[in-house]
Image: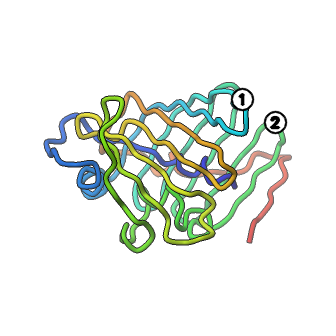
Amino acid sequence: MRIKNLVLAAVLAASPLVAWSADAPAQLRQFIDKVASATGDFTQQTTGQGRSKPQQDGQFAFQRPGKFRWDVKQPYEQLVVSDGATVYQYDPDLAQVTQRTVDKSIGASPAAILFGSGSLDESFNISALPDNDGLQWLRAKPRSSDAGFAYVDIGFRNNLPARLQLLDSFGQTTRIDLSNIKANPSLPASEFKFVPPKGVDVVKMQ
């Protein structure tokens, strides 16, 4: 499963009613502590190696720890769903579903920052970056050498996560922008359930 989709599956934001104000690392910790669930829209684009991939647009939802839905609508459909135990990635064009456990899928990925239940500092080195483009920034670098990415930068505006930029192990940068965020909604359990459609191949990853 592509590490950037898991996060960036994850990339989620808080409510404009949140009252704290601090540097970006403090805002991230407050976000994790106070925002248990959220929904919203995203745009995602990957660039690098002299080319750009088409922009993806879609909706997300999450409920910590470990439950999320990352639903790409354009330019093609793709769905990543976690029920807290298993992560499913469904590609309708390939008629294929891959599944693996949450621990193996998220681990020290950027998704762990927003969905995990463990300590941030056990998996990441967190540091503040200079303000840029109207945002307050932090950088999260995985402590594990096999995380699949070098770092993820998270930009905050008005105490809300607004943008993520991830540098992967292939030298590609993925940028995700968030919008229309609703924090702490009541989400039905069905939001994070997935049943493979009839006739698709199901590949279980170890």
Q: Is residue 176 left or right of residue 117?
A: right
**Badge 2: residue crowd in 10 Å (few <14, some 14–19, many ≥20):** few
Q: Residue at x 50, y 65 (%)?
A: 142
At label 2, the amino acid type is Asp
- Place of residue 190 in the rendered image (x, y in percent of width and height, measured from the top left): 51, 48
Residue ID for mark 2? 93
Taking depth in this image into account, of 43 and 195 the one nearest to the observer is 43
- Place of residue 123 in the rendered image (x, y in percent of width and height, measured from the top left): 45, 70
Quadrant in which the N terminus appears: bottom right
Q: Which mark is residue 22?
A: none
**87 shown above or below 143:** above
Taking depth in this image into account, of 186 and 146 the one nearest to the observer is 146
Q: Residue at x 27, y 57 (%)?
A: 29
Q: Residue at x 36, y 61 (%)?
A: 126
Quadrant in which the C terminus appears: bottom right
**41 shown above or below 149:** above
At label 1, the amino acid type is Tyr
**Quarter of image, res 85:** bottom right
Residue ID for mark 1? 76
- Place of residue 78 in the rendered image (x, y in percent of width and height, measured from the top left): 68, 38
**Quarter of image, res 137:** top left
